[in-house]
């Protein structure tokens, strides 16, 4: 290795180390803060404290129903992710594999829905969902129901687009061979496509789970009763206090970060592979 | 066969996708809307701050249930600005089922809502005797002579100061009573010189201190009618800005970012005074290391403004009943029997959350007589209540925060330039534009 490239190497590492520290610092601070008393957090302490248990106790003892919110968020995120995988991947697959005249036009319309900001859809959506409350069969997706938050995130233009792009790398020969062997279209999708595209699914799971877990605006207006509310709403409510308990808030945030962190770490490898669009066949 | 099936799947998938992702664009026959939460015996309350307002609402619920055991009351903690957003969403779509029966709204925000959505709020005149409340507060909760809100906490602005710093600078507690801002600047200089700390925090993104000064002189960003911006000819505002400018230019204040920066400065002992609402007391009290070092006095007045008094207000909220909810009468009854007229309940709130009431007879509540070790065995409520009694009445108008955003943009120029008349003229024009 020449001297010049060694210097470059060292420089690269220095820059990367600094960037890593900058990215990790908020997490580090969050964890430190969770173990300290509120007053020590405001004083800017950087050493781990012994107040974690007390913070957890305060959190559980407050009127905020943190555990209920945690449970709601988990149910919503898991169900949304599971449904989204089935619906959006089937759509993405179909858009790519089956040819029809209208295909690309329809796909453009789907993509167009990505361009409309959610704030613009909020009021009509709110009205629409409020009507569902009156129709017995649709009550479960009416306002103030867990279903209303799930249903809206099951098919997103981004996921369909993502699956369609990744399906482009899926070998057509596999489909042809399966057809010749007498496999039905549905089975080709579930038995051949799904297992082959594992890493794409993994990436989609991470993205969908995170989006659903952190979703704020729609749950905010769709969910009202305390037993239905999700974590981001509860954490946000904690902040607007004359005397915020920063230790408790940070404990709440640390706990809220855990599920997404766990999902990400489990699927890290597949996530990277899925994002780069490679298929291991 | 396979292909036909495949097509069916494809069509089905696309159909699901389109239905779901474009659900928002759906139109169709309107289905008659009936109230689904029409159970007569349920009240939903929204508020922010679980240690203060939420706690108060829960105690109120406990009191009310004693008399009305069949009522179900649910209190939900929301973020302060989210409440406004959700209310507007509900009012615009006229979907009331998701809205609360009772809601806490900050006093600076209510006029805008009352102006745009008058028919959504229930007038409480028949339920409550408004003469029992401080005038400045009833002015904030009413519009065109009709009272809508039930006054809750006072945002009495007071001056917390570090006795040890002030004494080190050669002043006594007596020197800090009923002072002027000119005297305050003088103390600030000495404190800086002798102790080496700044006198006050300022937040470039929050002009609370200017609001405090302005209201102490009986004026606001808008005139009494609330319809005209009052910036360029506003003498208390001009004087407030002069003082603000002097404090910054002489380096007597420390600039902080956000709420945590503000609380950090006094918990770390970086400032000698906190000029803010009485609601900041629990945050000061949290730091037990400084027990006995803090005292409370009235805020300074402006010497050059003859109307200026040693009292002002910052923040505070009031409770409102939404008229288009089925249970609005029950909700009004709830407010009347708790926050409105129940003195025993209010007394408990003083003990539980240190509430500073805006009732004129607040002083007669026994809980206000207690002294506090943290503040050197003095009775801080004395100052809070006296301030509350003397707060000048102003009309906050409809766009306090928006006008303040405009002023913030000009603030750098105001602080630097000798004559900031031109900046104020700009603010005046822009402020008038958004009021119209």
Image (cartoon, helix red, strand yellow):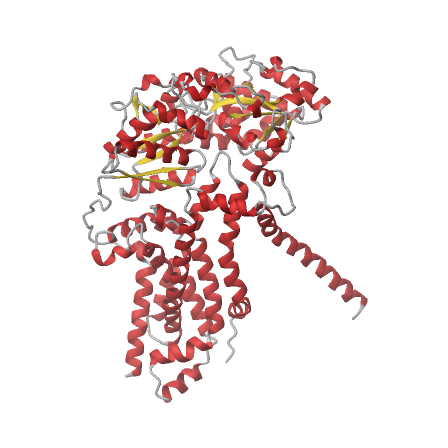
Query: Which residue sits furthest bottom?
Result: A181
Q: Quadrant of the N terminus of chain B?
A: bottom left
Residue B401 versus residue A260: which sits nearer the camera?
A: A260
Horizontal and vertical percent for residue A41? 59, 41
What residue sits 47% from the left and 38% below the top?
A240
Q: Quadrant of the C terminus of chain B?
A: top left
Query: Which residue sits furthest right?
Result: A3
What residue sits 35% from the left and 70% below the top?
A103
What residue sits 47% from the left and 36% below the top?
A241
Residue B260 versus residue B85: which sits nearer the camera?
A: B260
Q: Describe residue B152's horizontal placement relative to residue B239 as left or right.
A: left
Q: Describe residue B310's horizontal placement relative to residue B399 as left or right.
A: right
Q: Does any portion of residue A172 appear in the rendered image?
A: yes
Q: Quadrant of residue B151?
A: top left
> Compared with residue A30, is residue B232 higher up or lower down, i.e. above or below?
above
- How many numbered discs? 0
Horizontal and vertical percent for residue A266? 52, 66
> Compared with residue B44, is residue B22 higher up or lower down, i.e. above or below?
below
Q: Does any portion of residue B234 appear in the rendered image?
A: no
Horizontal and vertical percent for residue A79? 38, 62
What residue sits 43% from the left and 28% below the top?
B316
Residue B279 versus residue A215: which sits nearer the camera?
A: B279
Horizontal and vertical percent for residue A270? 52, 70
Query: Which residue sits furthest top?
Result: B306
């Amino acid at each position: 290795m020449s001297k010049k490239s060694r210097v470059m190497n060292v420089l690269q590492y220095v820059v990367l180390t600094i960037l890593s520290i900058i990215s990790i610092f908020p997490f580090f601070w969050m964890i430190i803060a969770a173990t300290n008393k509120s007053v020590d957090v405001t004083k800017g302490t950087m050493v781990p404290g012994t107040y974690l248990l007390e913070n957890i106790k305060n959190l559980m003892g407050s009127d905020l129903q943190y555990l209920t919110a945690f449970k709601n968020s988990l149910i919503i995120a898991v169900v949304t992710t599971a449904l989204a995988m089935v619906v959006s991947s089937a759509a993405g697959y179909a858009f790519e594999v089956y040819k029809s005249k209208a295909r690309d036009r329809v796909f453009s319309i789907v993509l167009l829905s990505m361009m409309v900001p959610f704030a613009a859809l909020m009021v009509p959506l709110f009205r629409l969902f409020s009507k569902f409350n009156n129709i017995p069969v649709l009550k479960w997706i009416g306002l103030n129901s867990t279903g209303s938050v799930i249903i809206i995130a099951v098919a997103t233009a981004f996921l369909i687009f993502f699956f369609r792009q990744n399906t482009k790398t899926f070998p057509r020969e596999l489909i042809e061979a399966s057809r010749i062997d007498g496999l039905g279209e549905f089975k080709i999708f579930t038995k051949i496509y799904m297992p082959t595209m594992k890493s794409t699914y993994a990436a989609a799971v991470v993205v969908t789970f995170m989006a659903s877990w952190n979703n704020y605006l729609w749950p905010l207006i769709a969910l009202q009763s305390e037993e239905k509310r999700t974590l981001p709403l509860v954490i946000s409510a904690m902040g607007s206090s004359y005397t915020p308990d920063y230790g408790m808030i940070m404990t709440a945030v640390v706990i809220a970060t855990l599920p997404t962190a766990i999902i990400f770490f489990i699927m890290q490898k597949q996530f990277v592979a899925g994002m780069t669009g490679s298929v291991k066949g | 066969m396979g292909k036909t099936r495949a097509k069916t799947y494809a069509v089905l998938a696309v159909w699901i996708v389109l239905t779901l992702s474009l659900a928002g664009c759906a139109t169709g026959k309107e289905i008659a809307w009936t109230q689904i939460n029409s159970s007569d015996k349920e009240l939903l309350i929204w508020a922010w701050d679980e240690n203060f307002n939420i706690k108060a609402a829960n105690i109120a619920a406990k009191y009310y249930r004693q008399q009305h055991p069949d009522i179900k009351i649910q209190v939900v903690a929301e973020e302060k600005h989210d409440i406004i957003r959700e209310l507007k969403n509900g009012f615009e779509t006229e979907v009331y089922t998701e809205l609360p029966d009772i809601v806490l709204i900050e006093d600076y925000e209510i006029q805008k809502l009352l102006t745009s959505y008058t028919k959504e709020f229930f007038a409480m005149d028949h339920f409550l005797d408004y003469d029992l409340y401080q005038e400045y507060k009833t002015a904030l909760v009413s519009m065109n002579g009709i009272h809508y809100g039930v006054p809750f906490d006072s945002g009495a602005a007071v001056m917390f100061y570090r006795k040890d710093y002030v004494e080190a600078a050669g002043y006594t507690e007596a020197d800090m009573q009923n002072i002027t801002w000119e005297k305050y600047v003088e103390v600030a200089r000495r404190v800086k010189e002798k102790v080496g700390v700044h006198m006050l925090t300022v937040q470039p993104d929050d002009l609370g201190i200017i609001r405090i000064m302005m209201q102490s002189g009986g004026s606001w960003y808008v005139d009494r009618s609330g319809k005209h911006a009052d910036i360029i000819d506003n003498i208390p505002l001009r004087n407030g800005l002069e003082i603000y400018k002097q404090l910054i230019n002489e380096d007597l204040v420390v600039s902080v970012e956000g709420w945590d920066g503000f609380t950090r400065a006094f918990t770390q002992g970086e400032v000698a005074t906190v000029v803010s609402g009485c609601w900041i007391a629990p945050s000061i009290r949290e730091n037990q290391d400084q027990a006995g070092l803090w005292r409370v006095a009235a805020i300074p007045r402006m010497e050059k403004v003859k109307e200026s008094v040693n009292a002002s207000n910052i923040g505070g909220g009031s409770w409102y009943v939404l008229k288009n909810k089925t249970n609005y009468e029950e909700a009004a009854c709830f407010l009347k029997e708790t926050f409105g007229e129940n003195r025993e309940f209010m007394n408990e709130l003083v003990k539980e959350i240190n509430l500073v009431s805006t009732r004129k007879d607040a002083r007669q509540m026994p809980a206000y007589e207690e002294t506090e070790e943290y503040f050197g065995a003095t009775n801080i409520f004395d100052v809070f209540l006296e301030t509350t009694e003397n707060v000048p009445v102003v009309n906050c108008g409809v766009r306090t925060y928006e006008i303040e955003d405009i002023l913030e943009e000009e603030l750098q120029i105001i602080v630097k330039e000798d004559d900031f008349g031109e900046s104020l003229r700009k603010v005046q024009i822009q402020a008038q534009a958004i009021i119209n």
